[in-house]
Amino acid sequence: MMFENIIGNEKNKELLKNIINSGSASHSYIFSGAEGIGKYLFAKEFAKGMLCLDEKNKPCGRCKSCLQMEGSNNPDFFQINSDGSSIKIEQIRGMNKNILEKPIVSKRKVYIINNSEQMTKEAQNSLLKTLEEPPEYAVIILISSNDNMFLNTIKSRCVKISFNKLTDDEIKKILPNVSDSLLKMADGSVGRAIGMQGKEDTYELLSNTFSRLENTNMIDMLKCKDSIFKDKEDAYTTLEYINQIFFDLLNKNINDGRYIKCIEIVENTKDRLKKNSNFDMTIDRFLITAWEAVQV
């Protein structure tokens, strides 16, 4: 049964099932919602259903297309992930070139752009050319935790499907032994809950610090550095969680330039760490510039 192994967002399950069964898919979608709530799982299952060769039972799980999807080698399915801290124009140009080639196995070709809010403006403009005149067999799915980062021209050409955060009971079905305190910090994101397990104290400090940054003294913020970034190997994950806090704040305060700036600061910090910049100096700079950004 379609979507049977995915928990939550029941209304979207029915919506996507109807699209698949009716054969009336649009050329482009935005799957929008908080990080870690299953948007990618929905997109992958949606793609599998659209590419299935069985006319009555999609996805059948038995046809050549379904088996290739299970083996991650379906020639009509493509996924784009960020290259470093962004999705670059070269990646979208490659997709635009590939999309002109007709499907090999199925009647359609499906492209998933994961964390698509990370597309540079140049990449978005390149994608726009395809969205304006897509091939009839192509379906593009933009997965995003913050569609406010898209150009308006991108948003206007896509069907937006909004995904809700999971309820505590739904998360407990996935993580039966999850604690109440972790559930509260996870805020409806099972992905966040999984990443937090065993590190509740650190993530509680992160939440308290960065969700109230404008009311935090910079000296006190710098003092918590050793607690927040005590493990260099976990620094990248910590920054991703901090960015999710900023995304949540931005969603509550639409178009607040302070949080857009903070998101950019986090991404730049992640990029510098990948380039092996001095760890302490990079983190100090991040804490100071993020604090300054929200004091404006």
Image (spheres, rainbow, N blue to C red):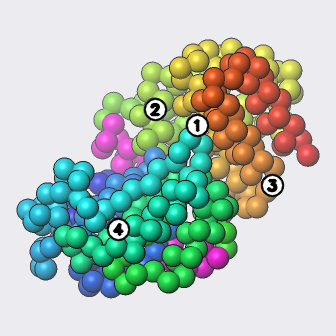
Q: Residue at x 56, y 76 (%)?
A: 129
Could you tell me the amino acid type at mark 4? Val
Tell me the SS state at disc 2.
Answer: helix
Closer-to-camera residue (266/291): 266
- Tell me if residue 162 can be seen: no
Q: Position of residue 147 (x, y in %)?
A: 60, 63
Q: Are marks 2 and 1 in contact (CB under 8 Å)?
A: yes
Q: Which residues are magenta?
A: 153-175
Quadrant of the rendered structure where residue 23 is? bottom left
Q: Tell us which disc is closer to us: 4 or 2.
A: 4
Residue occupied by mark 1: 241
Q: Is residue 49 magenta?
A: no
Q: Nearer the viewer, mark 4 or mark 3?
A: 4
Q: Label 1 amino acid?
A: Tyr
Q: Tell me the distance, in whole angstroms, between the alpha carbons under discs 3 and 2.
A: 28 Å
- Relative height, residue 134 to residue 246 (above, below): below
Q: CA distance from mark 4 to mark 1?
A: 29 Å
| Residue 178, placed above or below residue 121 | above
Specify which label sits upstream in the sequence, 4 or 3.
Answer: 4
From the image, tell me which residue sits under label 2. Answer: 195
- Determine crowd level at label 2: few under 14, some 14-19, many 20+ residues with C-alpha closer than 10 A: some
